[in-house]
Amino acid sequence: MNFARQSIALALICAFPALWQVVIAQEGVVEKTPQSMGEIIIRASKIKAIEPAATRLEASDFADKRALSSDTAHLLRNIPGLSLYGAGGVSNLPAIHGLADDRIRIKVDDMDLISACANHMNSPLSYIDPSNVSRVTVFAGITPVSVGGDSIAGTIVVNSARPEFSKAGEGSLLKGQAGAFYRSNGNAKGGNLSATLANENLSFTYSGSSAEAGNYSAGRDFKAAGLSTGTNAYVAGNEVASSRYKSENQSLGVALRKDNHLLELKLGVQSIPYQGFPNQRMDMTSNESQQVNFRYTGQYEWGKFQTRVYNEDTQHQMNFLESKLTTANPLGMPMATQGKTTGAAVSAEIILSARDTLKVGSDYQRYRLNDWWSPIAATGGMGGGTFRNINEGQRDRFDVFGEWDAYWTPQWQSQLGIRNSLVRMDTGNVQGYNTTNYPEATYAAFNAADRKKTDNNVDLTALLRYTPNAESSFEAGYARKSRSPNLYERFAWSTNNTMVMNMINWSGEANGYVGNLNLKPEVANTLSATADWHDADKEKWGLKLTPYYTHIQDYIDATRCPVGSGVPCTAANRDARTGFVYLQYVNQTAHLYGADVSAYLPWVKSSEYGSWTSTALVNYVRGKNETTGDNLYNIMPLNARLALVQRLGNWNNTIEGQFVSAKTDVSQVRNELKTSGYSLLNLRSSYEWKQARFDIGIENVLNKFYASPLGGAYVGQRTMTWGTPVPGMGRSIYAAVNFKF
């Protein structure tokens, strides 16, 4: 409790933001400035706190992208600095400036969700369908402590629509929407439905969605066609096996509003009966999730108060889909996990003065994980008893934070923040399938070890923003961010079997991993600056540049598992320069640097041809392990997206080119595969008429064959051989329709 008291005191001393509206009202800025400047200040007043390097998207910004993919992560693909690790059809993993997965804090309707899987198949963004997403905010690099914590890359916040109520005196409100889509590649199809019934104070909302697809096809054959070795599954030469999926999501929301107070309760369920993973040795054969999410928000004279309590329960199963399941072993390798996350958060935004605003708060997260593998026979390698991979795993986090925003003048603003985080981890005793293949000596040392771990992490953020005029702004900042290891990084224990080690891998390169009880938390120090030039109304042109540098102490990378520590851990494994290898998580030192550039420029605007606007996005990141001199794994090479957008009446048409350099800076310790450079052409068109919206388009118009640099190694079918990157999707024609009522 001394820690908690000290942390709360520190947060209260150190925290602070200010409401722009108050500055305007009390300092009379609008009255003292020309009309044009007054309009600009009013627009800025909508932002209540300084949020550095944040990209905010509303539903209208990504409406056309919902038709392209059933994976919510794909809604983020045009955000500066962001890329995607390849995974399942609805489970791609976002990366910010080369740092991915658990290194990013991902909040879905403000719930901090954790992937309850040794392969991270049920990633946080997989729990919300794109059709249900209303707002997206991405903080890259310099992340406010109020939205950070237990992450070193940044924060992604994805929210569904806010509850709606009828206007005063207008009776009840009934509205909704329904939609459907089809994509030719993989024969993907699905639909969504949402409806709201409300009066002035009470609102009920239902939303549901379903999506399914078969295996997708690459632009050409990349292997021989025929039966997957040892199976009865025929796989075409251009077919990316183990890429099919089916997903269903439903939610029910109830909200009660009284004056400036809002109570909201959301119940959600998800069912994924199957989802293939072409870059994992396993596939998802079931994922059932239940969520309860309660929130209170109140506006007071002194500011804003908010509290949230949530619970998420996931039952997850893995095994082989048909192209990996052999006839010799029809039962495969059943694996099961159960993850339970309970969280609570409370925060207050306090107006201290016309200049200063203080934001203080606390987060609590309780996570429990069981990971067990049932035997398939009485004897043999997977026979006997239950394999305990993580037994009663515990990861509890308690945070307090304080943040101070100061609006010194209309031109100068600053932000200072501090967060204290206490992370406690533990796990129970483990065991192998049997004493023949897994003698007690292989796990006795683990069971005898002190597995209780406590980390005390401190995050800091400092930002200064300068807005000299209506056409430019500049900001620079420093952030110290920290992340404790996840349960698998610390507690995955077995090195006695190649198969078992291969089951611990969320990196997508099909190597095998073992944890490390001695891992320390990662600590990242980031320097970043942003220059933003644009016209006064932000409609004609704009250019934004963000260079950054991050140094990471105790970066959790991998090394070949120590020779003699288990069956796969041999001298040959240590020295291998090709093939799949066996690794252990270790702390090392690393750095990353790069830059993001985004721009837009209108070309033509006329009543006859509409408006034509060009957009550009360029990302570059380079990552290096300072301890070994190796390259960091899965770093996106130089890439760009260039588009020409036409808006004519109700039509919106886009010609987009995607350009990616060859990936040659690869991780030697992982035997990471190189990929060639490529360029893709995409066409999109949408038409809105009254309450209807129609989307059509072609992705990869020229049916180019390519391998995504972050797609991982292809192990979608038997035999699982090293050397082939997962191919990207070939040409796909899609259509979608949505009706509002």
Image (spheres, rainbow, N blue to C red):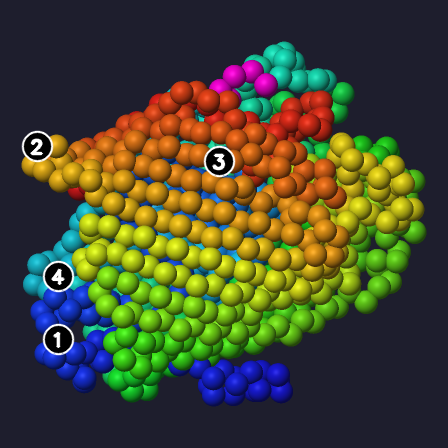
Q: Earlier in the sequence, mark 4 or mark 3?
A: 4
Q: Amino acid at mark 4?
A: Lys
Residue that carries the numbered disc 3 in the rendered image: 660
Q: Secondary structure at mark 4?
A: loop
Q: Is residue 122 left or right of residue 143?
A: right
Q: Earlier in the sequence, mark 3 or mark 2?
A: 2
**Rendering coords of residue 296 (x, y %):** 35, 70
Residue that carries the numbered disc 4 in the rendered image: 167
Viewer-nearest of discs 4 and 2: 2
Q: Which mark is residue 33?
A: 1
Q: Amino acid at mark 1?
A: Thr
Query: How far apart are labels 4 and 2 at the CA level?
Result: 39 Å
259, 139: nearer the viewer: 139
The N terminus, quarter of image: bottom right
Q: Quadrant of residue 726?
A: top right
Q: Residues within 10 Å of mark 1 (few under 14, many from 20)?
A: few
Q: Amino acid at mark 3?
A: Val
Q: Is residue 284 above or below residue 304?
A: above
Residue at 52 percent across and 26 percent down: it is: 706
Q: Amino acid at mark 2?
A: Glu
**Rendering coords of residue 73 (x, y %):** 45, 44
Please report the bounds of the magenta region as a residue range.
Answer: 216-222
